[in-house]
Image (cartoon, rainbow, N blue to C red):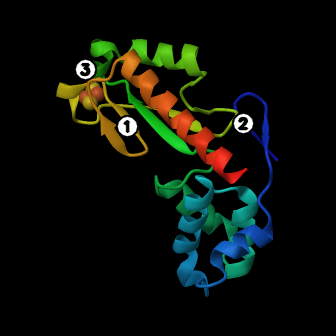
Amino acid sequence: MVELAGGSEQTAVTDQQVEELLKDWVVDSEDLIAAMLAVQEKYNWLPPEALDYISRRLNVRKPRIYHIATFYRVFSLVPRGKHILQLCMGTACHVRGAELIAGAMSRQHGLQFGKTTDDGLFTLERVNCLGACAIGPILVVDGEYKGNMTTNRTNAVVKRLKREAAKEEGANA
Ligand code: FES
């Protein structure tokens, strides 16, 4: 079990679940990074049980796997939400109101820098200048830059993602 921001827990990933991801195409240690990417894509992070399994399955020592996991930014060794929100807190964005946005995200949606919400829906990250100061404050939503953000626009984005997640959950129920 892995603990999330508010103390809730995430169920451990089983060998069978990881094998399901790899069984049709992973052959040997040549496929290590691709296998790690498949796990990252599925879970949005690299659960330790999954790395244990990959280590055994591909006969690769764990230090090598953890070295790769920390070297490439695409990998995360801590749980991340379904949606990654990155708020630029560089000087220009700060001056244009990023701090207000961060405060509103915290008050309205419980989003805190460096944390994943209890429902696993969002991870909020603080980033520095993204090189688009002229259209700051910038919020990056799952890799997509959104400029000239305000507290209202940010609220609308988060609410939309919540609505979509609820709809998806309803459809899968
Ligand atoms: S300070 Fe935010 S993009 Fe430059």
Q: Is residue 140 above or below residue 169?
A: above
Residue 10 placement, left or right of 29: right
Residue beneath the point at 61% across and 87% down: 27
Label at residue 92: 3
Q: For mark 2, give the secondary structure.
A: loop
Label at residue 83: none
Q: State which tag comes first along the sequence, 3 or 1.
A: 3
From the top left corner, tell me how far across and down residue 150 is, in percent.
Answer: 34, 18
Residue beneath the point at 51% across and 28% down: 159
The answer to which quarter of the image holds residue 122 is top right
Q: State which tag comes first along the sequence, 3 or 2.
A: 2
Q: Amino acid at mark 2?
A: Leu
Q: Amino acid at mark 3?
A: Ala
Residue beneath the point at 71% across and 64% down: 50
Categorize mark 2 by other alpha carbons within 10 Å: few (<14), some (14-19), many (20+): some
From the top left corner, tell me how far across and down residue 74 is, in percent.
Answer: 47, 55
Q: Is residue 132 above or below residue 63?
A: above
Image depth: mark 3 or mark 1 in front:
1
Label at residue 140: 1
- 109, 84: nearer the viewer: 109
The answer to which quarter of the image holds residue 88 is top left
Question: Label 3, label 1: how many angstroms apart (C-alpha)?
Answer: 16 Å
- 173, 31: nearer the viewer: 173
Ligand 1 contact, mark 3 (Cβ < 8 Å): yes
Q: State which tag comes first along the sequence, 1 or 2.
A: 2
Residue 50 placement, left or right of 163: right
Label at residue 4: 2
Q: Amino acid at mark 1?
A: Val
Residue 81 appears in the rendering: no
From the top left corner, tell me how far across and down residue 171 is, in percent.
Answer: 64, 50
